[in-house]
Image: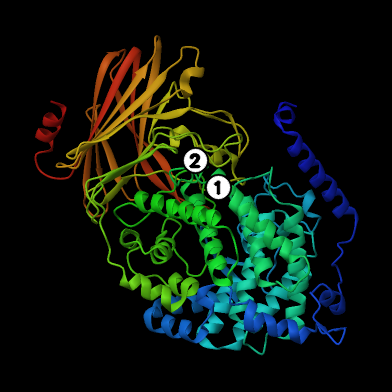
Amino acid sequence: MNKLREMSLEEMIGRGQQELTKLTDRLLVPVTSGMSESALYRKFEKTARNGKSQVTSSLVVEQLRKRNLQFLPGLKDRQALVGMMLSRFPDDCRAIISEADRAMIGRFDLLGFEDLDFGYPIDWHLDPVSGDRAPLVHWTRIDSVSPIGDGDLKVYWEINRTAHFVTLGQAYLLTGDDRYVEEFTRQVISWIESNPAGMGIGWAASLDVAFRAISWLWALALCADSPKLTEHIVSRVLKSLIEHGTHIQKYLSHYFSPNTHLTGEALGLFYLGVVLPELQSTWKWRRTGLQILLDQLPLQVQKDGVYFEQASYYHRYTTDFYTHLLLMIRQKGIGISETEIRQLQDKLEGLYEHLFWIRRPDGTWPLFGDDDGGRLIRLMPRAANDFSDTMAVGAAIFKRGNWKLAAGEATSNLIWLLGPDGLAEFDRLTPEKPLELSRSFESSGYVVMRDGWDRDSSFALIDCGHHGSAPGFGHAHSDALSIELAIKGTTWLVDPATFVYGADFEMRDWFRSTRAHNTATVDDAGQSVTSRPFSWASVADCRLIEFADRGDSCICSGSHDGYRRLDDPVIHQRSILLLREKSVFIVSDQFTALERHSYALRYHFAPGCEVTASGGDTFEARNSKGDTLTIKFFVSGDTLVLPRTVVEDGWVSICYGQRVKAPVAVFEVKAEGAIEVTSVMIPQGRGRKQMISGVIR
């Protein structure tokens, strides 16, 4: 009832209309079900010749092949694309062909799961991880949060996005082997026949419908000149794509998930409208998709360029969405106002700039907030925390040498998206190291501090920002004042990421809890309290208090009120100081209270580290390369018992669905009244004891 009171009249009407449409769709046969070929072509704009319609299957296929399927710069010159791929990226070519060969027998790496066997023909309703099958019922009867049996809905959704259709198309283009086109046609017809419009889990999320439509359009483009892509196959695919676009248009996530769900769905409509302009009413899809994407820019991308849900993986999603939008607008000459194109470019540049700054010295990216392991288009397999292909494309588009520094070597994404000209532009760029070594992102509250831009530099990312996006905070984690830390090129402290959404509620709550982040709990309670898998009962309000770069040092401070809800309220304030000359970080945690409380600081180490506790106030960490880190604690205030150091077993997820054990250093202290705990983090080398003493003095 409270939620209903918070809704605007527009939202109540919108939700009501969607519910009525769902009921109607359940009761009625979809209008395109069993559509004849003549009915399909009546949906295309008619070209009058002597007063007669000249729309035929051959005309539509010809238009698709010769004009419409060149929707991105990389698809303009197929011969040049193939030549450049074979000469510059032979390893990527082999990897693509290997993945395509496995897809031909129904075996896939999806999310964090390796070598999943979906059988052959592919069982589109199977979860090979659990062995469960999704029922073939109307999509409205499928709960989009609760698991089916012991399975994870994400596995069903991922296979039904059919991202591997693009891989099959790539393999055909690189080899000229029609077997890959034949397999694409077999599988796409299999999907259509196994998933009637609106039936089954493949229709349960409009975002997945949009991603699938984009995948099919890419596959059509890549296979366009193969004789195996017959007019009959194209007709079947077009009929289904009409169903896809109709479904997306009816069930846009304006109120359910007005985040990357909405923008991804809008991009799907935009793609369909751009690639199929002859189809009646697709101009509405293009217009709707474009308008939503432009309208959401100032809502979802904050003034400092950070995605509003405070989740780096979804930030990357958003960057990719708007990159495709910009490239298609340019490629197809789609007219938008100067103000709109300027805003699009400025916001997109801000998204890239944030990704540039949060890159770790080892070339990976932190996964803070939620991550779901998916990709808009999977042109080349990469680790979930490797955003270099996105950065390479951004560097070439905006001609930014510093972003090339973050991207590293050229990636094959440059060829697929931008073509040889894009790769040449990237090659011309000179990697540039910024003069700045720190950056405060004021709207989002993130602070980055470094002592250099080299592989062996030190780096910290501090979260002094708000708890995701109101009102639902669906992809937020309880990570106020948490830090990520790398010293002299070694990544030590990490955010454990996400691992799971709905298949394991206990693990879902652990990975987004305060205990799972590099910050403090009070009386074993978290800053924010979870509710359902994508909602919260209470959230901490965190803010940045101070940020100052003094050249030889950099400091930031923040505080949150998450523990104000306790019977005796507690305010947590944290300051982080970087001493650049020595690559030393000092973390000071101040707790303001009146009564007795138990405080625990947790530091989550990267997988592969060994951590030992000694003396009640020190941790020694060592990684597989022999690098070492010492963390020494100092307490100021009235402690009730001696502090305690303990190493707990924790988890780190490097990709959705995959987790590995990792050590957690825990420093516990009980105190009455105000207390301050200082953590001094010293890298390997001689004289660490003297260094610690000098730092404290």
Percent from the top left, x then y, of residue 687? 9, 39
> How much space separates mark 1 and mark 2, taking CA atoms?
8 Å
Question: Which picture quadrant has residue 230?
Answer: bottom right
Circle 1 residues within 10 Å: few <14, some 14–19, many ≥20: many
Which image quadrant for residue 684? top left
Q: Position of residue 181 (x, y in %)?
A: 63, 83
Please state which of residues 493 and 460 is positioned toward the viewer in this rendering. 460
Query: Is any atom of residue 130 visible in this view?
Result: no
Say which element carries label 2. Answer: helix
**Which residue corresponds to the image point at 79% horizontal and 59% vertical from the top-left?**
198
Dividing the image into 4 quarters, which one contains the N terminus? top right
Left or right: residue 187 compared with residue 651: right
| Marks 1 & 2, CB-CB < 8 Å contact | yes
Judge by depth and name the residue closer to the eye, 157 or 445.
445
Question: Where in the figure is residue 616, as x and y percent of width and height?
Answer: 25, 26
Q: Quadrant of the C terminus?
A: top left
Disc 2 marks a residue whose amino acid type is Phe
Label 2: how many Cα within 10 Å (few below 14, some 14–19, many 20+): many
Residue behind mark 1: 500
Using residue 247 as the reference point, say whether residue 675 is left or right of it. Answer: left
Q: Is residue 476 left or right of residue 662?
A: right
Residue underneath mark 2: 511
Count of number-bearing discs = 2
